[in-house]
Image (cartoon, coloured by chain):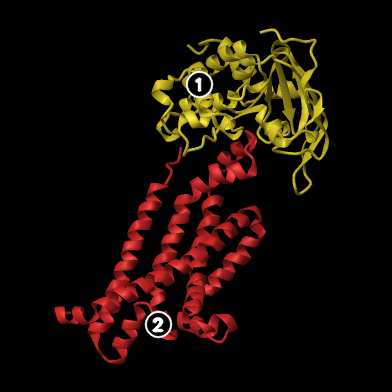
Chain colours: A red, B yellow
Amino acid sequence: MNSSFLAQYGEEIGQLTLEHLWLTGASLLFATALAIPVGIWLTRAPKWAKLLIGATNVLQTIPSLAMFGFLLPLPWLGERAARIAIVALAAYALLPILRNTYAGIRGIDPAILDVARAIGLTDRQRLIKVELPLAASFIFAGLRTATVTCIGIATIAAAVGAGGLGELIFRGVASVDNRLVLAGAIPAALLALAADAALGLLERRFRVPAA
Amino acid sequence: MPAPSTMAPAIEFRELTVASPQGKRLLGPVSLAVEEGSITAILGRSGSGKTTLLRTVNRLIDPDSGVVSVRGGDVRGMDLIELRRGIGYVIQETGLFPHFTVERNVGAVLEAMSRPFAERKTRSDTLLASVGLDPALYAQRYPHQLSGGQRQRVGLARALAADPSILLMDEPFGALDPLTRTEMQEMLRDLLQRLRKTVVLVTHDLDEALYLAHRIVLLAEGRLVANLAPHEFLASNEQDVAAYLRPYRLRAAAMGRGNAHE
């Protein structure tokens, strides 16, 4: 990659990176808003846990290209490629967040929850003051896995015209131009690494040493 | 430590039974009155129902039949949160919140009751001092920075924070080494002489029961088989008590023979 290449594509790379971030960010927001409350609810109704976590696991096994294809003919969704991309990416992000929220809370030392009940914390206080802070590190770990996965899979979203860094990759493949492939792949990889490091930091920040 | 005998019972169990979810009887029927300001030790083998009985008082377990009353009122008719905030609870594993400082752990009940920070802090300092921990040194530490005995002291301070009239203790010193345990028992005895709480203490340690309690209750396979003063308990030849005391009596007899083999 030389300077004339960057002069020609630099602006587009920047634009597509922002698009990539927007697709991933929006899908993670939806996935988190759904998976954390459902994960908390599952800790209160554990008989549903196997079924729901299993279902999100099945979502995870659908090949991403096929997932985008399935969503294409749906009424409102199919109108805008970005909508398809966000829904599909959110579907992939559900499992790690849901599983870690559930496992993080279920994994808390039972003696701690026993005392929380016994000293008269309300259910809400127990959740906010005890369960969520103690599960936070786990939840961030799930979010981290989800984010890295989403940034990777978002490159496929270009196949349905949703934009993002995948566009450069697909164009590079079509025109047998490795510089274009790398122009998409390198920023995508850097985004994933940066997100991984940032969320890893949060994960460690909220880790609680066992008493 | 003479127990008051004329007051109404602080806790009363009437014809209480508890069964496992599979229908196996874990406890009862048990009837027992615990007098205000008294210390009652509950002894018995593992699985005899000691912890189950204790946990019906603050409704961590609801009985299948029978009634638990606290100061004359059926616990099922009381507000659950209010009931629990009015009863101190100490367990062997301490259950300290690992992400709270010592001070915040001690003030946890007051925090749940939305009391102001300054009050929680003052109360925590007072209580830490009374369980033998210098607040200046320990208030800002986290549970993992404490020894087992110190954690248990914090657990006790937390149980006392809202000044409950009843204290439930489940094997509070069971995980401590013998020397630390003895220190804790002495500290608790001094503290209780000053504070006069109604205490129900589940323990495996006969010495602890004799040292601390006014009444000794023995459970065997879920049934209450003895409810005696310590000296009566030690002298009893009732079958279940004798079975429980057998190893202690054998050991005492062996020690009484002294160094006979020399």
Q: Quadrant of residue B240?
A: top right
Q: Chain of mark 1?
A: B
Percent position of residue A21, x then y: 38, 69
**A183 on left or right of A41:** left
Can the viewer see residue B50 in this picture? no
- Identify the residue at image location x=47%, y=81%: A81
Which residue is denoted by mark 1 in the rendering? B122
Q: Of all residues shown, which one is farthest toward the bottom?
A: A175
In-front residue for pair B122/A60? B122
Q: Quadrant of residue A8?
A: bottom left
Can the viewer see residue A208 in this picture? yes
The label on residue B35 is none
- Identify the residue at image location x=42%, y=35%: B144
Residue flagged by tag 1: what amino acid is it? Thr
Q: Quadrant of residue A24?
A: bottom left
Percent position of residue B163, x then y: 62, 21
In-front residue for pair A122/B73? A122
On screen, B160 above or below B261? below
Between the residue at mark 1 and the residue at mark 2, the CA separation in whole angstroms equals 61 Å
- Identify the residue at image location x=63%, y=19%: B209
**In the rendered structure, are the residues bearing label 1 and label 2 in contact, judged by CB atoms less than 8 Å apart?**
no
On screen, B66 above or below B161? below
Estimate how packed mark 2 is, as few (under 14), some (14 to 19) or many (20 or more) residues with alpha carbons within 10 Å. many
Residue flagged by tag 2: what amino acid is it? Ala
Estimate how packed mark 1 is, as few (under 14), some (14 to 19) or many (20 or more) residues with alpha carbons within 10 Å. few
Percent position of residue B81, x then y: 69, 35
Which residue is denoted by mark 2 in the rendering? A158
